[in-house]
Amino acid sequence: MRKIHLYTGLAILAFVVMYFVSGYVLIHRDWFPSPRQKTITRTESLSSTGSREPSAYSSYLRQAFDLTGKPNQGRLADGSWQFNYSRPGTLYEAVVTPAEDRVLITTRKENTVETMISFHRLHGYGGGKLYNVWAFLYDLASFSLIVFAFTGVYLWYKLTKRRLLGWILLGVSYGYAAVTILYLIYAP
């Protein structure tokens, strides 16, 4: 049982470090060399999907043209459908023409810096099996940090006799966090 805890802890630590490193790259993007992204565009014929619903088009495009990642869709001003599929390292954009007979597929291969930022911004589920596993491990790492904080406060409370300074510092740190969150939510 100890080995399971050790391996679980190391896996969670790896994701915490990954989140820290990717956040550092996000904050200091200009410190890292950023070569241009590779973009490939192709036009494909589009056969009928049977349904004109966006979800049917999205599923059809994923399967027919091997577009992986988390889907997102929208309607353009000219009546075209735009479907985006994103995953760290690769972005796909598929635009179905208003006549619904062709699809323009643009593939963008991200450089290392953009890939790290994509890892940091990864959220939600629905981008395929590997994407969902990665998102789950991020959630698990975040949950573990929250449990670690609460158990640390509990242990401090149980093991310390004089608590006034600790309560003051804990209150200041929670107050600072609350003010920062409120500022980020309501700042112009």
Image (tube, helix red, strand yellow):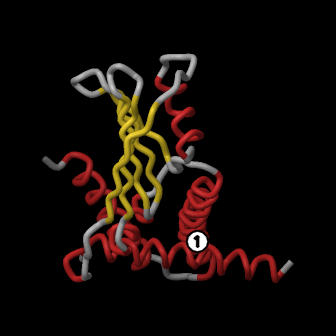
User: In the rendered view, does 122 fall on the left or right side of 1?
Assistant: left
Residue drawn at x 50%, y 33% is 58
Residue drawn at x 38%, y 41% is 43
- Give the image location of residue 154, x and y in percent: 60, 70
Residue 63, by quadrant, is top right
Secondary-structure class at tag 1: helix
Residue drawn at x 49%, y 19% is 53
Outermost residue toward the left? 188
Q: How many marks?
A: 1
The amino acid type, in three-letter code, at marker 1 is Phe
Residue drawn at x 55%, y 69% is 145
- Give the image location of residue 163, x and y in percent: 48, 77
- Give the image location of residue 21, x and y in percent: 41, 78
Q: Residues within 10 Å of mark 1 (few under 14, many from 20)?
A: few
User: In the rendered view, does 6 fall on the left or right side of 115?
Assistant: right
Residue position for label 1: 148
Residue 159, by quadrant, is bottom right
Outermost residue toward the right? 1
- Give the image location of residue 114, x and y in percent: 34, 67
Above or below, 159 against 47 in this view is below
Choose between 47 and 53: the one closer to the eye: 47
Above or below, 78 against 107 in this view is above
Above or below, 51 against 2 in this view is above
Query: Quarter of the image containing the N terminus?
Result: bottom right
Choose between 47 and 119: the one closer to the eye: 47
User: In the rendered view, does 149 fall on the left or right side of 120?
Assistant: right
User: In the rendered view, does 63 fall on the left or right side of 119?
Assistant: right
